[in-house]
Image (cartoon, rainbow, N blue to C red):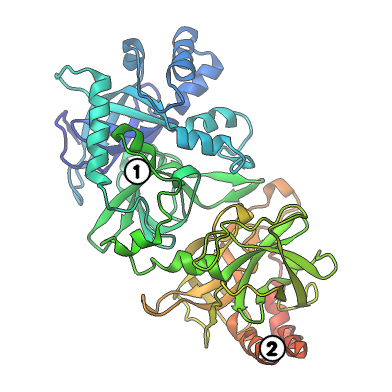
Amino acid sequence: MRDSTRRPKSAGRCVAIVSRSHPAHGASGVLLNDGWILSHGSLLAPYLRAREARRDKDVDDKLGDFFDNEVAADGSIARLPDHLQDYLRFAVHVRSSEGDVREDEASCKLESAWRCPLLRESFGGDLLFSWNFAKSSSGSGSIRSMLSLFLLLRMDSDEQRDSVVGSDAALSRFYWENFEPGVPALPCRGDPLEIESTPFGNPTFLGSVSRGILSNAVGECDCLLVTDAMAVPGSEGAPVYALQSKKKRRLCGMVIAPLSWCRGEWVDFTFAANLRACLAVHASVELGASSSSSLLLARENKWASSSALLPEMLDRSLVVVKCGPNWGTGVVLDVPSGTIITCSHVVREASGGRVKIARVGETEDSDDTSWSIDGDGGGGLTAKVIYRTRDGQPYDLAVLKLEPAQLDLKALRMARGLPKKGASVLAAGYPFFGSELSASCSLGTVSRSEPAILQTTCCVQSGSSGGPVLACGGGSLVPPEIVGIVVSNAVTASGDPSARRLYPRFNMAVPVEAFREPLRRYIETEDVRHLEELSTNDPGAKETWSLYLTPRSKI
């Protein structure tokens, strides 16, 4: 390894940052210009733990006072006092070019910090109230407080500059080089993303890549990106790129939470900061209320992918099915008749054979931007449960009739045939957020494809039941087709509830072959008797869906 203080010309690339005083702890960062490095507040986790343990009262108190009192909530940059800069020293590892196996190592120190007001509002509001970003409740408050914290480090140099002015200039320059006017703030939902990180903060793994798609964007100005690309501890601070082609990528985010839990359920999605939204204040840029929602902008953008119309399709074809305190996802199969398919277990508690329906997102034909499903008054739609299979009986399906029909919805087409094993598929639905957000999506492959069951590696969570599994290999001119309906994922069997583990990327769906013809005949005739074919007494299907000793986790 080369020990050097020269500044690599690889702005936007990932670096590994290792604490000098806590060498077992490290994180990732984004290389800016002129020796500046942008990272995330999680880099300070061992220092905050030391503060709680009162290992060095004087330094710990000063460190706590600075981040509690000096780092303002308005996004202004605060420079660390010299004695804290000397205390917070790190080694930074960086590769000067892609494919270079050699690393440059340099010393750096933490010079400045600030809190992003957009992230602070998002993590402190109702939207993420039921979320945890630590496995145990102890220390979860300090971890949540760090989620909106950005850090600026600087490689050691003989140059003497005013750090605040230098950091502002570096951020502004970095912003305009990566987020120039006319380029959308985000890729579209469903577009491919790439994370380049340092897993576990270990320089051995510097430059590790994982890929997924943009599953959703949440918070004010879409300041939080949700992706199914895998990340692990130590990836905090890593750059997230939108993939434009095999050789081109565009920086769009930074990992801030690789692990999370919602209502006690482990979430296999990664949270990242939308850097354009979070850095705009330092470039004197005003953002609109939703910086990524302009479909027109996505169409005109030269980088726009073939999936630019996917968000519109999802928001017009999927609905939230609300039944008691729980919800699932429904898929529109026919607009004039108001036919929706979902899972039987989603509507098990339907009162009077009716359920509440909601959909989120503005459509071209409606002025409504949100149809509330909470409460009894105003804005809600209802659907009649036309048919549902009995509990424990294959297939776990239900058919709803929306009353009245909503003509601005869009039906999804059912595929003619099963997908091949190994084919790429997309699962979509309303996990976690219910009707508060647009539908989320996850990319995966078909692990098993049989007439009785479809198994995929898409990341599906609570609320996804009844959502579609879509074939997505037909190109930009072929709309996605339904190849299955998500039913469940798996949990390990254990007598101890605390030892049970859920596997979001091991999930089962009802294949389209099991419901296409009964639904087609029902839509044509409105004869409910055709729907009896959705239930089967076939021994093979029953054996398949019993899953032997592996319990299903209804979602």
Q: Which residue is mark 1?
A: 276
For the point 77% across and 90% down, the residue is 529
* Among the two numbered marks 2 and 1 on one chain, the one whose residue lies closer to the N terminus: 1
Does residue 376 appear in the picture of this structure? Answer: yes
Q: Verify CB contact (< 8 Å) between mark 2 and mark 1.
A: no
Measured in 3D between alpha carbons, the distance from the residue under mark 2 to the one under mark 1, in whole angstroms, is 49 Å
For the point 28% across and 46% down, the residue is 179
Locate residue 317, reporting x and y percent.
Answer: 56, 71
For the point 35% across and 50% down, the residue is 185
The quarter of the picture where the C terminus appears is bottom right
Residue 158 against residue 289 in the figure, above or below: above
| Residue 328 located left or right of residue 73 | right
* Badge 2 density bin: few <14, some 14–19, many ≥20, Cα 10 Å: some
The quarter of the picture where the N terminus appears is top left
Locate residue 300, reporting x and y percent.
Answer: 30, 63
Task: Say which mark, if any, is on residue 18.
Answer: none
User: Which of 399/427 is in front?
Assistant: 399
Q: Label 2 sits on what residue type? A: Tyr
Does residue 487 appear in the picture of this structure? Answer: no
Q: Which residue is mark 2?
A: 522
- Label 2 element class: helix
Locate residue 120, reporting x and y percent.
Answer: 50, 33
Farthest residue toward the top?
58
